[in-house]
Amino acid sequence: MSRKTDTPKQTWETVEYTDSPELPDIEDLQIVDKEFLPRPEELVFRGTETEYGTVSLDKETAAFFKNKAKESGASYQTLVRSILKEYVARQSR
């Protein structure tokens, strides 16, 4: 397979990213604490003793956990239980 040599090279222009209309002003940005809770795929704990109860979730929250569970191969109940367990552990410190 031969390479084309008659194609003109792309001329690049310098872009000033600070002038980009898509970027928000630095004053509008918020700092997010990434360590508040681990990512959903890091929360799948198995083999712990459980106590059964009922928790009602709004549809948006349930859909979020069901999608994350599908990605990680766990049940959404396991993800919810893991997040609650992590929350309790951090609050107990």
Image (cartoon, rainbow, N blue to C red):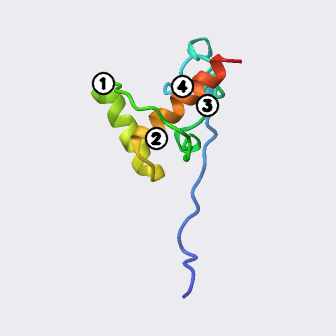
Q: Which mark is drawn over residue 58?
A: 1
| The C terminus - image quarter | top right
Total number of numbered labels? 4
Q: Are marks 4 and 3 in contact (CB under 8 Å)?
A: yes
Query: Residue tagged by mark 4?
Result: 23
Q: CA distance from mark 4 to mark 1?
A: 33 Å
Query: Residue tagged by mark 3?
Result: 17
Query: Residue tagged by mark 2?
Result: 78
Q: Amino acid at mark 1?
A: Asp
Q: In which quadrant of the rendered view does residue 58 lie?
A: top left
Vertical side of 3 occupied by 76: above or below? above
- x then y, percent, for residue 76: 40, 41
Marks 4 and 3: which is nearer the front?
A: 4
Marks 4 and 1: which is nearer the front?
A: 1
Judging from the image, what secondary structure is the residue with disc 4 in? Answer: loop
Q: CA distance from mark 1 to mark 2?
A: 17 Å
Q: In the orientation shown, which residue stands out farthest toward the bottom?
A: 1
Residue under the point 40% across and 37% down? 65
Q: Amino acid at mark 4?
A: Leu
Disc 2 packing (10 Å; few <14; some 14–19; many ≥20)? some
Vertical side of 3 occupied by 58: above or below? above
Q: Amino acid at mark 3?
A: Tyr
Q: Are marks 3 and 2 in contact (CB under 8 Å)?
A: no
Upstream in sequence: badge 4 or badge 1: 4
Q: In the orientation shown, which residue stands out farthest toward the left?
A: 59
Q: Nearer the viewer, residue 25 or 60?
A: 60
Q: Amino acid at mark 2?
A: Thr
Upstream in sequence: badge 1 or badge 3: 3
